[in-house]
Image (tube, grey):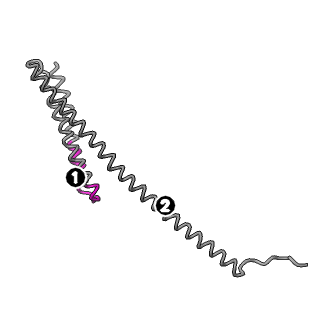
């Protein structure tokens, strides 16, 4: 019974791993088809190269699960080595996943910083334009008032 439940679990996880691998490939092909800046295309390429091995390592570890139970029962030392290798594979996959998280933070942090700088530049430019227009309008009002365009006082002398 352990073997059957282990096989069912492995097959269901492997189906998910297969779906993830297909998704990674589609994402990479979409990134290649779009017109991207060089930096983003490089990021997408390295993202693909990080995620494929990570997903495959999880798939390999999952596929090997059903074989670990009979092995540890038949040859305990070989089973211990086998499970040790599986644990190392999973730890390596976790390290690759953490590297992917770090790469995401760095890439999007740079984009956010660049966008904040661009936004600040635009705000400064908009303020400059607003001040220039306000100054021009004030100068125009002063020019009109200074050239006798104001109304004379009514009813001042008796």
Residue at (17%, 32%) from the top-left corner?
Answer: 61
Q: Residues within 10 Å of mark 2 (few under 14, many from 20)?
A: few
What type of secondary structure mainly makes up the magenta span? helix
Q: Position of residue 121 (x, y in %)?
A: 45, 61
Q: Position of residue 93 (x, y in %)?
A: 22, 37
Which element is circle 2 on?
A: helix
Q: Earlier in the sequence, mark 2 or mark 1?
A: 1
Any mark on residue 123, and which?
2
Any mark on residue 29, and which?
1
Q: Position of residue 5 (x, y in %)?
A: 18, 23
Q: CA distance from mark 2 to mark 1?
A: 37 Å
- On-image quarter of the N terminus: top left
In the rendered image, residue 91 lying in the magenta stretch gets the answer no
Q: Is residue 1 above or below residue 84?
A: above
Residue at (12%, 25%) from the top-left corner?
Answer: 81
Any mark on residue 122, and which?
none
Q: Position of residue 52 (x, y in %)?
A: 20, 43
In the rendered image, residue 24 lying in the magenta stretch gets the answer yes
Q: Which image quarter: residue 87?
A: top left
Tell me where the magenta segment starts and ends, as one range: 21-41
Q: Residues within 10 Å of mark 1 (few under 14, many from 20)?
A: some
Which element is circle 1 on?
A: helix
- On-image quarter of the C terminus: bottom right
Residue at (13%, 23%) from the top-left corner?
Answer: 80
Q: Is residue 81 left or right of residue 105?
A: left
């Amino acid at each position: 019974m352990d073997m059957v439940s282990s096989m069912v679990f492995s097959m269901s996880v492997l189906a998910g791993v297969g779906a993830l691998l297909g998704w990674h490939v589609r994402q990479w092909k979409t990134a290649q088809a779009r017109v991207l800046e060089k930096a983003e295309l490089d990021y997408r390429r390295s993202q693909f190269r990080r995620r494929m091995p990570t997903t495959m390592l999880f798939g390999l570890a999952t596929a090997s699960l059903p074989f670990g139970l009979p092995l540890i029962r038949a040859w305990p030392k070989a089973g211990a080595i086998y499970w040790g290798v599986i644990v190392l594979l999973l730890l390596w996959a976790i390290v690759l996943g953490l590297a992917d998280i770090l790469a995401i933070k760095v890439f999007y942090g740079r984009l956010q910083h660049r966008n904040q700088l661009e936004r600040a530049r635009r705000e400064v430019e908009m303020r400059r334009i607003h001040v220039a227009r306000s100054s021009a309008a004030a100068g125009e009002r002063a020019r009109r008032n200074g050239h006798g365009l104001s109304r004379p006082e009514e009813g001042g002398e008796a």
